[in-house]
Image: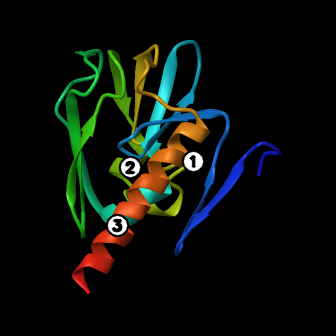
Amino acid sequence: MGAEDLHYKRSRFSTRLFTDRLYTGGHSWLRRGEGDRWQVGFTKFAVRMLGEAVELGFEVPPGSEVQTGQPIGWIEGFKAVTDLYAPFSGIFVEGNPALSKEIELVQKDPSGRGWLYTIQGTPGDGCLDVPGYVAVLDATIDKMLGKRHDAS
């Protein structure tokens, strides 16, 4: 664990947040690669909501221009099917080739080898630093806890 990484815990959920990454309100992380290429993956929170991943597909071919918020693919889990969205405008580079052989990496190593795709461009204002993502997690978990309390 890096010296500046943050251990987050709220209610029964805990995770490690990496200070060298950006995050989205949709519970994805972005890690800068070479130049302006960014690997995108699911946070531990997103993986927990998805359940075990069973299939992944992309609706845009490599080299396609994409816009912020545009659906670019989907992932199916035992708990849900969710769209994958471009976190910022740029060029869709590729999906993670390792996932075609080992989709389990999404759960086993979501912050490492289980990354989903690469996009080229510059993250915009919708991408959050760790404190910004902590605020999203707090609000999301509080809402979930509130729903549970309302149901009882």
Residue 24 placement, left or right of 56: right
Residue 99, labelled with which disc? 2
Residue at the image position 57 percent from the left and 25 percent from the top: 32
Q: Are marks 3 and 1 in contact (CB under 8 Å)?
A: no
Give, as a three-letter code, the residue at label 2. Answer: Leu
Quadrant containing the C terminus in the rendered view: bottom left
**Residue that mark 1 sits on:** 112
Using the rendered view, name the quadrant where residue 150 is placed: bottom left
Work out whether residue 103 or residue 69 is closer to the camera in this orientation and state it. Answer: 69
The mark lying in front, picked from 3 and 1, is: 3
* Residue 102 visible in the picture: no
State the SS at label 3. helix
* Residue 128 visible in the picture: yes
Considering only order in the chain, which callout, 1 or 3, is on the residue closer to the N terminus?
A: 1
Considering only order in the chain, which callout, 1 or 2, is on the residue closer to the N terminus?
A: 2
How far apart marks 2 and 1 lie (CA) works out to 12 Å
Residue 96 pos. (x, y %): 40, 39
Label 1 Cα neighbours within 10 Å, binned few <14 / some 14-19 / many ≥20: some
Give, as a three-letter code, the residue at label 3. Answer: Met
**Residue that mark 3 sits on:** 144
Residue 28 placement, left or right of 112: left
State the SS at label 1. loop
Residue 94, labelled with which disc? none
Residue at the image position 43 percent from the left and 20 percent from the top: 125
Work out whether residue 62 or residue 85 is closer to the camera in this orientation and state it. Answer: 85
Work out whether residue 46 or residue 146 is closer to the camera in this orientation and state it. Answer: 146
State the SS at label 2. helix
Residue at the image position 22 percent from the left and 24 percent from the top: 61
Label 2 Cα neighbours within 10 Å, binned few <14 / some 14-19 / many ≥20: some
Give, as a three-letter code, the residue at label 1. Answer: Gly
